[in-house]
Structures are given as C-alpha cells and as structure tokens.
Amino acid sequence: MRLVQFDFPYSGPFGEEMARAMEGLARSINEEPGFLWKIWTEDRASGRAGGIYAFTDDAAAQAYIAKHSARLAEFGITGIRALAFDVNETLSRINNMPG
C-alpha cells in the first residue's frame, strides 16, 4: 500500500458547502486505477485543504499525484505539497487502519 498526502492553500468553500461542491470530484476519484480510499482534509483557520489517499502501489500513487497536481494548477492553485509514503501495515492494523 502507498499513502499520498496532498495539501495546498484553499480559500473555500468548507464543510457541507465543500461537500456539495466537490461531490462529483469525490465520485470520480473512486474510478482512479489502484485507488483504495481517501480522507478529505480542510482547515478554514489556516486556509488549507487536501487529503490523505491510499493506493495499491507506487505506480498508481505517482500517476495520481501527477494528475491531481495538474488539475489543481489548472484551477490556479500554487504551493501544492504532495508526498508519498509506504505504509507499515502490521503496525497500522494495530491502530485500526481501514481495510
């Protein structure tokens, strides 16, 4: 499993308004090759948003990083941080990792 963390400056919408505005995007992410799950993140106080994603492998994770970074840039978003990590599944299961 490969974990991807995105975070970037974001001025809103947040909360339920964000959920309504991003529902189509959220559904489309489910169709990405190798995608397992995502946790959406937002912090109105700092003006940042992003997400934590799980993919089956590094190739799928890297392909999504490239695709989503380009999509965010098309929206004029700069300061994008995207990091990829291996998951220690043994320890993570002890701490209730999904799946």
Image: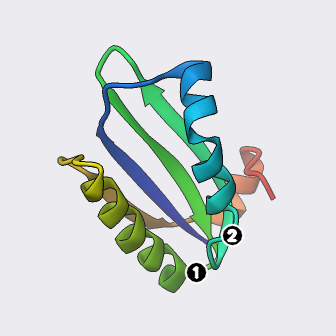
Q: Nearer the viewer, mark 1 or mark 2?
A: 2
Disc 1: CA contacts within 10 A as few (<14), some (14-19) or many (>=20): some
Residue 69 position by quadrant: bottom left
Residue at the right extreme of this rendering: 99
Where is residue 30 shown, x and y percent of the image? 69, 62
| Mark number, residue 57 | 1
Type of residue at label 1?
A: Asp
Type of residue at label 2?
A: Glu
Q: Earlier in the sequence, mark 1 or mark 2?
A: 2
- Residue for point 54% across, 28% down: 18
Q: Distance from label 1 to label 2 (Cα)?
A: 15 Å
In this picture, residue 34 sits left or right of residue 79: right
Pick whichever, 54 or 78, lies toward us.
78
In this picture, residue 49 sits left or right of residue 53: left
Image height check: is 45 above or below 7?
A: above
Q: Which residue is mark 2?
A: 31
